[in-house]
Image (cartoon, helix red, strand yellow):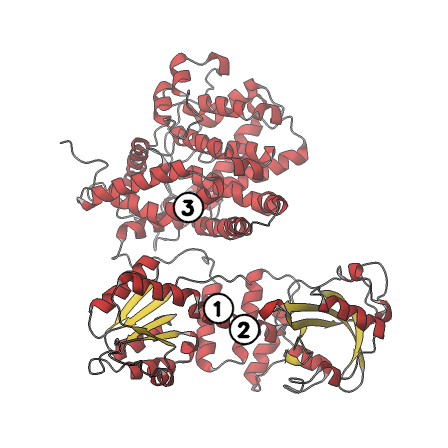
Amino acid sequence: MKLYQDQLQVMLVFAKNDGQCGGFLRACERAGLRCSVARTPEAALQLFLETHHDVVIVDRRHSRRLDADSVCRAIRAVKSSENTVIVAVVKRPDREEASVMPLITAGFNRSYVENPNVMSCYNELIQLEHGEVQAQFRLRACSAIFTAMEQSEEAIEITNEDKVIQYVNPTYEAMMGYQQGELLGKEVMEVPESESKPDLLETINSYIQKGKEWQGVYYTKKKNGDSVQQDVRITPVTGQGGKIRHFVSINRPLNDSKMDTCGGRVPAESQTDIQCSKHKDWRKGSLDVRSTTSRGSDGSSQKRHSSMARIHSMTIEAPITKVINIINAAQESSPVPVAEALDRVLEILRTTELYSPQLGSKEEDPHTSDLVGGLMMDGLRRLSGNEHILATKQSQHGPSHMITPLSLTDIPQRVAQAMENEESWDFDIFNLEAATMKRPLVYLGLKVFSRFGVCEFLHCSEATLRAWLQAIETNYHSGNPYHNSSHAADVLHATAYFLSRERVKASLDPIDEVASLIAAAVHDVDHPGRTNSFLCNAGSELAVLYNDTAVLESHHTALAFQITTRDGKCNIFRNMERTEYRTLRQAVIDMVLATEMTKHFEHVNKFVNSINKPLAALEENEGSGEESMKTILTSPENRILVKRMLIKCADISNPCRPLRLCVEWAGRISEEYFAQTEEEKSQGLPVVMPVFDRNTCSIPKSQISFIDYFITDMFDAWDAFADLPNLMQHLDNNFKYWKSLDERNLRSLAPPPE
C-alpha cells in the first residue's frame, strides 16, 4: 500500500535553548523536517493544537524548569495525539538503568538518553521517521480507509485465516438483515449456509487458498432465511510470515434479470468460469455515498437529507462532487465542532481556485503579491464607477502590406550565421533579432518548420508556409518591449528544443509536434503589451468580447486562425483532411489557452500527479515493463498534459536561459510593466501591479519572486520528465545573480561599473 506522507512536523519542548535543544534543531534542519520550539507547557499545548505534530520531544532532565510528564499528559488529552510519537529526553544514568514505566504511564512512547551530538540526534529522528512515525501514519490511514468502507454502498466483509468474521460494514449488515455487531467474532460456518453447490465452494476455496482473487456470483441466505443472489469478489490478503492472514469479500446483490458480461444469465450453480467472472460489470466508484438513510432524527436533518438525496441521485458526477458528497454524509453523524470544520472545508472545495496557493499578506512580500496578483487575476480588480474604454491606437506592428516572402535557400549570410546554433539551448535570439531587423520569426520559423517536416505533414508548399509566417509576424507589435515577434521566436526555439528530448518524442505524435510549433509561433499574436487585468479594468473591446475570461489567449488563437484561413496564399491548413484539421486546431487552441496564468498551478499539479509520480513509481519498481511506461507517456489525456506543460515552460523559460539573455528579457518585461503602471495612473484605472513603478521598483526582487513562485516547481517537474540539466544550472546561476544584487540593495538589472 503506497501512501502520500507530508513533511514530518517536529516540536521541541525545552525550557532553555541548551546544547541538546540545539542538537535536535540542527538535526531537523539536516533531515529536512519542519521544526518548532516551545518553552512552556502552555506554549507547547497551544502549538500542538495548531499544528498536530508527528513527533514531540520533551526535555525531562530538569523537573524544576519543566514538568515534562504534565506536558505529555496534556498533549495526550487531545484526541488527535493518539498517532503522535512523544519522546522524553532523560539524563544519562549514573549507575543502573531506571525503569521506563513512569514514562509509559505519563504517555511517552520512548526515551532518548541525553546526547547533544547532531549526528546522534539526526539518527534518532531518522529512526523515528522510518519506525514508529511510519507505523502511526499507517494507523491514521487505516482510520480513513475504514471511514470509506463504512460509507461504501457495496457490502464488505473481512474474515481472518480461520474464517472468523473480523469486520462487516453497515451496508453488509443491512443487506443480510443483521444488527450492528451481531456478526463480529462468528465463524462464517455459523452464518446460514450458502445455497451454492459444494463444487462451487471448493472452487472458490481452491482459488483463495492459493492467494488468487475469485470473482463470481452465488446465492446466500439472509438472517430471515430469504435467499439473495450476490456478485462477489473475494481477495486474499497476505500478512506476517508471507501467509494469508485475511480474506476481504465485496458483495453486491443482483436482480434476477441481471445478465452477465459473457452473454447470458448467470446461473449461481454453474459460476465456475473464472475468466468470465472477472469481467463482471463492477461499478468503479465503490466509495459513492449512500443517500437513502440518515442518522439524523430532527426535522431539519431530514429536510436537508432529502435535498442531498436528490443531488446524490444525479448520474453525472465530477470527482469533486463525489468528495463533497462524502463530506456531506460524514457531517450528518459528526459532533457540532467537526460539522462546522467540515463546512469550512466545503467552502474551500467549492471555490474555483483549488490549485492556486494562497499568498501571505501584501506587507510581507509586496513584489510577489503584486506580480502574482497581476498575472493570475483575470481582470478581477473592478472599478466602482464608470468603466474606461481602451483608446484605439495607431497600429504598432508595421505596414499591412506583405513583404516579399523569402526562401530558406535565399537567406542573407548574416542571418544564416545568427542561426547556425539554433538547435542549442544557448542560441542567442537577440543576435537573430538584430540580423533580421526585428523579423526573427520568419527566418527561424522557416528553419525550424523545415527541420520538423511541417510542410510535408500539412501538404502545403514552402511558399505558403513563408507567407503564413510573414502574416503572423506582421501582426506582432514591434513597439512592445517584450511581447513582440522576438518573444514568439524565442518560444518557438524553446518548443523545438523540448520536442527534441527523447521522452517528449516518445510521448507525442507528429500531429502533436506540428501543433506545438504552430501554437508557439502564434501564442501572443497581436498582444497589446498589457495584461488581461488591464484590459478587463479598462473595459476594452476584447475583454467585452471574451467575457473577461482568458481575454488575450482567446484573441491570439482566434486571430491566428482568421489570418490563416482568410487568405488562400497563406492558408497552411488548406490541404488537410477535415478530421485531422479539427484535431490539430483543438490542440493549438488548448496549448495557447494553457499559457494563461490563472490556471498555472492546476496545469503543473495535474502534470506532476498524472505523469511525474507514476513514472517515478515505475522507475522505483525495476520489474515494471516498458509497456506500462508507454501507457503513461502516450495516453490521450497525458499527451494533452505534456503539450500544455511544454508550451508553458517554453513561454516563461527566460530565467533558464544563459545569464546575458535572462537579464535582457527581465529588462524588457519590466519596461512593459512600467509602461502599463504609468498608463493605469494616467487613465485613473486600478493599478494592477503597484510595485512596478519605474522610480521605485526592484527588478532583482521581482525576478526572485517570479522564480520562487512560478518557475522553480514547474521546471523541477519538467526537468524530471524531459531531463534538462543545462536549464536547471542556468536557473540556479540566474537566481544567485538576482539574489546577489538584492543583497546589495541594488534595484537595477546589473551592478554599477567598477
Q: Which residue is mark 1?
A: 346
Judge whether 599 appears above or below 34 on screen.
Answer: above
- The image shows residue 656, relative to residue 299, as above or below, that is above
In this rendering, the answer to whether 580 lies above or below 374 is above
Residue position marked by numbered label 3 in the rendering: 716
**In this view of the protein, which residue sits in the foreground, 118 or 748?**
118
Name which residue type carries label 1.
Leu
Label number found at residue 721: none
- Determine the CA span between mark 2 and mark 3: 37 Å
Q: Amino acid at mark 2?
A: Asn
* Mark nearer the N terminus (3 vs 1): 1
Q: Residue at x 59, y 19 (%)?
A: 461
Q: Secondary structure under badge 1?
A: helix
Q: Single out the mark in the foreground, 2 or 3.
A: 3
Quarter that holds the N terminus: bottom right
Asked if 693 appears above or below 315 in the picture, the reply is: above
Q: Quadrant of residue 340?
A: bottom left
Is residue 683 visible to us here? no
Instruction: Return the disc, 1 or 2, that comes first in the chain's sequence.
Output: 2
Q: Residue 328: which disc? A: 2
How much space separates mark 3 and mark 1, taking CA atoms? 31 Å
Q: Is residue 640 visible?
A: yes
For the point 39% across and 80% down, the residue is 78
Question: CB under 8 Å between callouts 1 and 2?
Answer: yes
Which of the 4 quarters of the picture holds residue 216?
bottom right
Observer-nearest residue: 62 or 688? 62
Question: The residue under label 3 is which amino acid type?
Answer: Asp
Left or right placement of residue 78 versus residue 225 in this view: left
Q: Is residue 704 left or right of residue 351?
A: left
Could you give the CA–CA distance between mark 1 and mark 2, rounded to whole angstroms?
9 Å
Look at the numbered disc 3 and give the secondary structure of its residue: helix
